[in-house]
Image: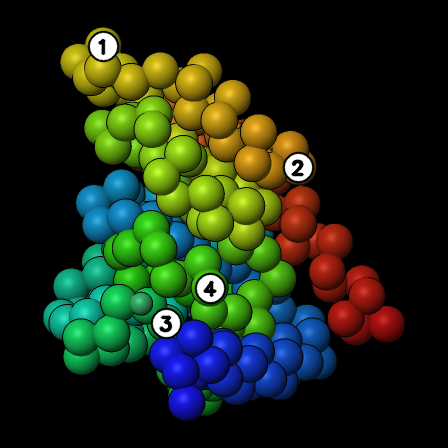
Amino acid sequence: MSTVKVITNILEANDRIARQNAQLFGTAGVYVVNLMSSPGAGKTSLLERTVDALHGKLRMGVIEGDIQSSVDAERIGRHGVKAVQINTGGACHLDGNLIRDAVEDFALSELDLLVVENVGNLVCPAEFKLGEDIKAMILSVTEGDDKPLKYPLMFQESSALVINKIDLLPYVNCSVERIEERALAINPALRIFRVSCTTGEGLATWTAWLADQVAGKRPRARA
Ligand code: MG
Ligand code: ZN
């Protein structure tokens, strides 16, 4: 069997499990976000801010994916929501199987929003479906405005792009306009947010949009 064939089979098997997960989430009426970015772009920081903003309004749960350690789950846990840590033990992305196991630790029907923080990586997390409602990605301005050109699949697959660390724009050689232009050329439907998890700028727009998406799923799921 050729390598291409093997990879195709792996992705097809994963898609099947992801569809089962999606069915589970639909029955429970929980909205699931697959949050992706490179390491250090601010996934956990955005999640901490999002939890603080929405915790009283929505019942939230978090799954943290990392190659190793539980520091991110501990960070989220300090904000008062349940966070389950997955350690992939070397694998550079989460897959449907890992999520199926992790959600057993939650009472899904008691949640409105489950956010899955994927392993920090701009490549294969975009290829492996988890059963999520949407993929969202973060790009920080310190990474540069060429990333949509280099990693187009992630931008194509995402419904939302959060451009983080805009407070650092005066110090870096990066154009937000160029990021947006290049990202929208790949995915014209992409919803873009400019935020700083340090200063809090732009976060209210992001959390309001996210809460709207969650509200959109609930009536259908519970009808
Ligand atoms: Mg993290
Ligand atoms: Zn990978």
Q: Respond yes or no on whether mark 4 lies under 8 Å from ligand 2.
A: yes
**Do the residues bearing badges 1 and 3 touch, measured as CB atoms within 8 Å?**
no
Q: Which of marks 1 and 4 is nearer the N terminus?
A: 4
Type of the residue with mark 2: Ala
Question: At x 22% / y 50%, what residue is drawn?
Answer: 39
Q: Specify the quarter for ligand 2.
A: bottom left
The kind of secondary structure element at disc 2 is: loop
User: In x, y percent, where is residue 105?
Assistant: 41, 85
Q: Distance between the residues labelled 4 and 2?
A: 19 Å
Provide the residue designation for mark 3: 94
Provide the residue designation for mark 2: 189
User: In x, y percent, where is residue 8?
Assistant: 49, 77
Q: How far apart are marks 1 and 2 (CA)?
A: 28 Å
Of badges 1 and 3, nearer the viewer stands 3
User: In x, y percent, where is residue 222?
Assistant: 79, 73
**Do the residues bearing badges 1 and 4 touch, measured as CB atoms within 8 Å?**
no
Left or right of 149 in this view: 214:
right
- Which residue is nearer to you in this view: 207 or 167? 167
Provide the residue designation for mark 4: 127
Provide the residue designation for mark 1: 170
